[in-house]
Image: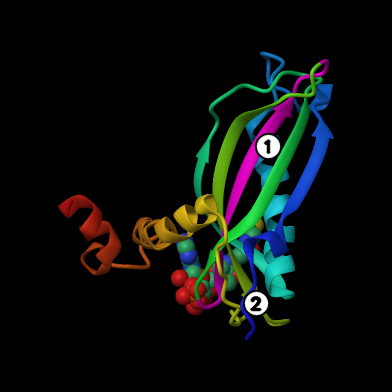
Amino acid sequence: MQPKYPSDSVTTLTDLVLPGETNPLNNLFGGELLARMDRAASIAARRHSRRITVTASVNHVAFNRAIPLGSVVTVEAKVSRTFNSSMEIFIDVWTEDRESGIRTKANEAIYTFVAVDETGRPVPVPPIEPQTELEKERYEAALRRKQLSLVLAGKMKASEATELKALFAE
Ligand SMILES: CC(C)(COP(=O)(O)OP(=O)(O)OC[C@H]1O[C@@H](n2cnc3c(N)ncnc32)[C@H](O)[C@@H]1OP(=O)(O)O)[C@@H](O)C(=O)NCCC(=O)NCCS
């Protein structure tokens, strides 16, 4: 399969925070943001693989900044690394100042998607070649995150997680 670039899968969703989507502090409800990130990540995974894709795991979410009612929120997702059938998707969340238009990073997340056939069986996806420094950094660390996710899900023995062991040995 022909390799693809992370830029081939970039998916940007921009939307407002409306009253039905907030918590009692009038900030965006976490579950609403998770859904927006899942949608963007799903499209990015589909753009990379051109297959049906399903969420296999939410590896990491950091709700660093509250996002107030009325904010314009942009969710940017792109594939950071592929393995055989699975893809790591990195998601950056930005808010936009109404007057200046300046964007501030609010949150980030990492999801794993798997490409499947019509019967739900995993199928291979094209490899990926990171281009920018940030893409290379995210690519390098992705195997470690995959192993951690598999260990936490009980799908890999900790003793087999070579990248994690190397991390703690440093
Ligand atoms: C995700 C799913 C297809 C994996 O199927 P499976 O039978 O476990 O298949 P495999 O063990 O071959 O795993 C397929 C790939 O997913 C990866 N994977 C599975 N669970 C994972 C996890 N928790 N974290 C990271 N990667 C995971 C495997 O490492 C493998 O990757 P690779 O092919 O790139 O090496 C299957 O569990 C599924 O359909 N889950 C439901 C998905 C869904 O409905 N999501 C929406 C939730 S409402």
Query: Above or below — where is 120 with respect to 80?
Result: below
At label 2, the amino acid type is: Val
Q: Quadrant of residue 6?
A: bottom right
Dot placed on the residue nearer the N-terminal end, 1 or 2? 1
Residue labelled with disc 2: 116
Residue sitting nearer the eye, 134 or 113 = 134
| Residue 90 locus on image (x, y percent) | 58, 51
In reply to whether residue 96 is colored magenta, the answer given is: yes
Q: Is mark 2 within 8 Å of ligand 1?
A: yes
As helix, strand or loop, the secondary structure at mark 2 comes to strand
As helix, strand or loop, the secondary structure at mark 1 comes to helix
Residue labelled with disc 1: 33
Q: How crowded is mark 2: few (under 14 residues within 10 Å), some or many (20 or more)?
A: some
At label 1, the amino acid type is: Leu
In reply to whether residue 33 is colored magenta, the answer given is: no
Residue sitting nearer the eye, 74 or 154 = 74
| Residue 118 locus on image (x, y percent) | 73, 81
| Residue 103 locus on image (x, y percent) | 71, 28
Residue sitting nearer the eye, 154 or 145 = 145
The residue lying at 69 percent from left, 69 percent from top is 48
Q: What stretch is highlighted in magenta?
A: 84-99
